[in-house]
Amino acid sequence: MVSLGRLAGRFTVIILSACVFARPVCAAVTADNRLDLTGNTVGYAALALFVIAYLLVMAEEFTQLRKSKPVILSAGIIWGMIAYQYATHGLSQAAENAFRHNLLEFSELFLFLLAAMTYVNAMDERRVFQALRSWLVHKRCSYRLLFWITGFLAFSLSPVIDNLTTALVMCAVVLAVGRDNAKFVGLSSINIVVAANAGGAFSPFGDITTLMVWQKGLVDFGTFFLLFVPAAINFLLPALLMHPFVPAGIPETDNEVLKMRRGARTIMFLFGCTIATAVGFHNFLHFPPMLGMMTGLAYLQLFGYYLKKTHIPVATDSPNYGAVGDVLPMQQEDRPFDVFGRIARAEWDTLLFFYGVVLCVGGLGFIGYLELISEAMYVDLGSTTANVLIGLLSAVIDNIPVMFAVLSMHPDMPLGDWLLVTLTAGVGGSLLSIGSAAGVALMGQARGQYTFFLHLKWTPAIAMGYATSVLTHLWLNAPTYGVAVTAR
């Protein structure tokens, strides 16, 4: 049997042979020096390439092919075909300018996420999340109370440290206390995914989609919090429906206690200062938030230098070995803090996947497909209906390309609809376990206990939360529909 990867490779060769080496196609040149390539071979080939690449992304769990690889290759081929066609019409500069614009879009988000991921990795290295897990485990809470505690913490932490990291930390807690209770682990994992996605929807730092909307200047930092109540309802309603099915009783715990390492609290404080810097640069100086985040990364670098210079190794025969202040030097883990080691541990597959997606979608938009989709959705259906459908679409397709496509369409919508698409793209992924990075990650972390079909069983309850949150937004934030907003 021919593998999916080989089929994709053969089909790519066919596309390249038919398009790149074919005779140039004729296309109308618009007033802004753009070619309409939607109805010819190049356009069809680019669309087919993106579909194949995304099918490989969706099959990552089965093929073990990292999701960044197919989209990066597709991005290069798509823009190569575009450049070839524009060169044959003497419009190379127009294609180059369009590519540079998309590259700038990615660069701003890349540097922002790199700084945020470095801080999260630094807190992980200083045992912040392990200490939180240890503290929760030793509280001797019942299964049902832990179900709510982990849910509320997921909802509260995801606006700051992103929904994926939050979900992984909370799932670790659930597995630590209820590993032998599959029903508790399964229901709690569903609750964590829904809560983390909902919490990430009302903060620019909670999800990449909200970050993109904020960096575009479409929604102010404080305005995102108008989504707090709809997001909370999206989390609470399914949790209330699941609560009676959570097992009763109190789980057994071990006696191991973990503490944070030296400098952990300072790093958390510096992360807060970094967020404040990013907000200040964007709101008051009108610079991209990325500049504030990279400035904040320097805070961590300088503090890391201090930690490294003041690090005192502890001999294994010392009576203090194993507990020095809030440091836990444990053999090979007794090492100085290295900020560049934290940068190296950033989720590079995700960052490079984002690069590929931005350039692929940007290329399809430059070809002209996004204008056609925008006409069909936002003009024919209306922006509110279209934004609700965007949320349903994000349950199947990752919300990053969906949101970037919406931003690339430049739909003329009021503030209320920009808030709505931010909400639906964020929480719509909770409808299926494969609809969000948090869900996919937890299926691997709690393998066999949290599954696609278990999540699907509770999709009607989650859909009730989705519908109620949308209606709550339309009612509660009705005044925002009178505020005009234009994408830059």
Image: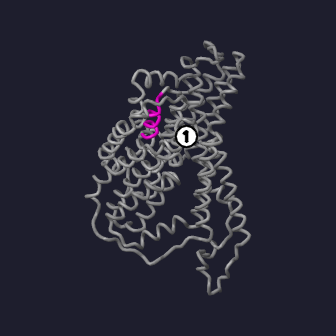
Q: Look at label 1 and name its amino acid.
A: Trp
Specify whether 97 is left or right of 236.
Answer: right
Q: Where in the figure is residue 228, as x and y percent of width and height?
A: 42, 47
The reply to whether the magenta stretch includes residue 4 is: no
User: Which part of the image, by quadrant, shows the C terminus?
Assistant: top right
Q: Is residue 77 visible?
A: yes
Specify whether 241 is left or right of 140.
Answer: left
Per the picture, the main secondary structure of the magenta-coloured stretch is helix
Identified at 58% across, 27% down, the residue is 14
Identified at 44% across, 43% down, the residue is 226
Identified at 45% across, 36% down, the residue is 421
Residue, far right: 309
The reply to whether the magenta stretch includes residue 417 is: yes
**SS of the residue under disc 1:** helix
Rendered view: 106 above or below 444: above
Q: Where in the figure is residue 109, as x and y percent of width and height?
A: 61, 42
Q: Where in the figure is residue 10, as x and y percent of width and height?
A: 57, 32
Q: Where in the figure is residue 139, as x and y percent of width and height?
A: 40, 72
Residue corresponding to mark 1: 214
Magenta part of the chain: 413-423
